[in-house]
Amino acid sequence: MLDLVLRGGRVVTASSVDVVDVGIAGGEIVALGGHMGEAATEIDCSGALVGPGFVDVHTHVREPGQEWKEDIASASRAAVAGGYTAIVAMPNTDPAIDSGPVARFVVERGSDVGLLHVAAAGAITAGREGTRLAHLDDLWDAGVRMFTDDGDAVADAAMMRRALEYIGDRGGVLAQHAVDPSLGAGAMHEGWVSSRLGLAGIPAVAETTVVARDLLLVAETGCRYHVQHVAAAGTIELIAAAKDRGLPVTAEVTPHHLTFDHTAVLGTTDPVYKMMPPLREPDDVAAVRDALRAGVIDMVATDHAPHADHEKDVPFEEAPNGVTGLEWAAAAVNAAAELDERTFFAAMSVAPARLAGLVDHGRYPAVGVPANLVVFDPATTWVPSRTMSRSQNSPYLGRPLTGAVRATVVGGEVVWDAGGHDDAA
Amino acid sequence: MRTLLGTEDLDRSSLDGLLDDAEAFLEVLDRPIPKVPALRGRTVATMFFEPSTRTRLSFERAAKALSADTLSFSPGTSSLSKGESLKDTVQTIAAMGADLMVVRHRAVGAPARVAEWTGLPVVNGGDGAHQHPTQALLDALTIRRAKGALDGLRIAIVGDIAHSRVARSDVFAFATLGADVVLVAPRTLLPVDLTGWPCEVSTDLDAVLSDLDVVYLLRVQTERGGASVFPSLREYLRRFGLTRDRFARLRPDAVVLHPGPMNRGVEIEAAVADDPRALVLDQVTNGVAARMAVLFHLLGGADA
Amino acid sequence: MTRRRVLDEADIRRAIRRIAHEVIERNRGADDVVVLGIPTRGVPLATRLAAAVSDIEGTPTPVGSIDIGLHRDDIDRRPRVPLGPTYVPEPLDHKTVVLVDDVLYTGRTVRAALDALADLGRPDRVQLAVLVDRGHRELPIRPDFVGKNLPTAPDERVTVRLREGDEDEGVWIEDDR
């Protein structure tokens, strides 16, 4: 008897989208096809898409060090509720993930929680301070394949060049938080809204200058390079040109940059709309949507960045950057980007898994493939009223969404079943 | 009207109403007993998270002339230094029985947040570089008393527009009252994108000087050093300061305003500052009346 | 709704003329009299009364206005109304102030005017002139000079219109019965 059957969904495989059942046993997909027999557990997938579980290459789990915002257990619960089967923890913890033991701690905590795969990204520089390299080899030996000082850019050109050389040698990927610190000292996008509000602005060139410089260094070093949270239209042109030249470059966009623009800050200057990079112009939103559809931007990453209420209940300028997003990322992308099924899963699952080197994730359903899957209903409209995260700083709370995660399967186990939750579809 | 957070959303009739009442309050302030019982029993809390003696005193004078009680908060003497949050601080003062808060804070939008957290009527006493609406009212009142009305007047606002809450409030108030506003500053002191601002822009004071009815000089923030946005204070005076020479080229009935405190020798030459056509002290007097009008509008009436 | 005119333009003119004589008689001349109108319609009435007194006496009688918007005892119960002008033509100490209003009803407006007056100076005496006294006092206040005593029911409305600010002139009683 099968352990689990996903019954009657539109299954997105490597070659087609068909209404079939997915039979799972021993943590793997063992059968795809017409009406399948009884199983210990069944999930009705009618009307929903069944595809590779989502993978987030940009999650701030806040543990170790800032557990009042989030911890690995709460981040895991939020992630599976959002359809994720693997997440990559950002290294801006306290202490930073700049050495082997901290990376191992995060991965082991994720295994102990046991809901989904938690991988760790490593810092590029020690303490993310930008002055000397982190323990890159120790991190590598602890399984780290993606390196970033996220939260800060590697601003120093010589340091960036050295890091690309070293990480390039090992075959890892360097991910850049592309915001120049001297141009990026403001509180929101530099434009008519910041001018009207009297808020210090962050111009789009804060992003493009860093990416332009980095791409020259990538061309020289050949290291894999990933642009985190692209928000400016100008960056897309740079990435497209680099890809045309065959450089090993990828890019991500967040759900909120696909959804909101800088006018969200007008009115009450609600810090829920404060993040880095900032929400930019409607033209930038249109550009990142187009780029995601065209594949210039390869993937969606949440930049899930929890902050406690007391940290966001302050004036805009004094609030920390960041929004949560794991639970509603797929719905936000579904509503904003209008992707076909294949591009949707490529952006949400396949490309991020490949970037992070997660070989058991982001694989289209097929017999023999590990059962890391999501059941996503793209048509349901609902309003989220609560979160599994420890923090509430999401602009999606209380806002109608189209698209809901019906179930999440990790290693053949159902780790999220919306049927058991009254606020979901 | 429940809060006064900025001038952008004030329409002509609201502005006229406030200014008309402010004129009535000027008469009150001129009486042998300059006090009326209009807000007896009400408590106005002045919450100044950024030091500003003159604005605070002006609000407190206004509240007392209306017979309101005042609660005065300043960060130097408070538990803010013990790490209390803004939200906790204002909720504490609200719980003491404040009926209205005047909030000055260095962060943009702080007064709006305070209004949200306390549910009280809030007057923005200046938030970062965003808005300072009572300054705009007192400026408009001063111009109206000097010139009769703002309709058709040509007003230049000169100086650090980018970092000025006074400029942001004045532009919208003056334009709504019918004036023709031009901002004058070097590009480094202008906001990046003036979409929706009802004004013109010039980088050449001398070019606009001769047809001005009002020159509004902004304070150069010498504490910023000026160094990063213009070369030096000396060069600023030469290009954008109101020198005696420029003053002489103004129309004979043109008046000069400044929000104070003035940097004599930087944005204004000393002799110009002391000329009777420099209405700086009128602005101060008018400030009390304008703030009385605002407090009376927010607290006097069943809809408050 | 019923609506009936109780005074026309000529009636008002005669009433003011009569009050002017009474003011002069009561005060043995008008040398120390200052007439202050209560906005809105007390102000034109005060101007007319002062003109009538001046006309009879042959010397100018000072006239001004006293707004009571800041002295009302119901500020937090009624919608806010724009403030009217307060203008005191000369110091009030040792003068006889004649307060002028259009309609005397509960007496609360006059109470507020007396409070406002106390902030403006210390006249030797204060007298009250009204065009219409409709009764229903809530405070111990009585007029010194009355244009017309007008018995009314509490649910009736008394409307005064004057040429200075209105399209026509007269006093009407209206009710919704």
Image: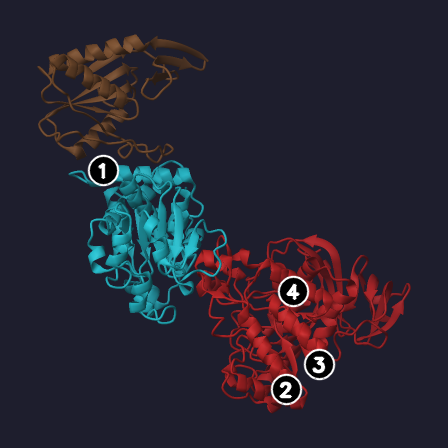
Structural crowding at the residue carrying mark 3, measured as other residues with C-alpha within 10 Å and reported as few (<14), some (14–19) or many (≥20): some
Structural crowding at the residue carrying mark 4, measured as other residues with C-alpha within 10 Å and reported as few (<14), some (14–19) or many (≥20): many
The amino acid type found where label 3 is placed reads: Gly
Q: Which residue corresponds to mark 2?
A: A220
Residue B257 horizontal/vertical position (percent) = 28, 51
Q: Which residue corresponds to mark 1?
A: B27
Q: Which chain is red?
A: A
The amino acid type found where label 4 is placed reads: Val
Distance CA(mark 4)–CA(mark 3): 25 Å
For disc 1, the chain is B
Q: Considering only order in the chain, which callout, 2 or 3, is on the residue closer to the N terminus?
A: 2
For disc 2, the chain is A
Secondary structure at numbered mark 4: helix
> Closer to the observer: label 1 or label 3?
1
The amino acid type found where label 2 is placed reads: Glu
The amino acid type found where label 1 is placed reads: Glu
Secondary structure at numbered mark 2: helix
**Is B29 displayed left or right of B75 in the figure?**
left
Please tell me if label 1 and label 3 are on a single chain: no
Structural crowding at the residue carrying mark 1, measured as other residues with C-alpha within 10 Å and reported as few (<14), some (14–19) or many (≥20): some
Distance CA(mark 1)–CA(mark 3): 78 Å
Q: Which residue corresponds to mark 4?
A: A288
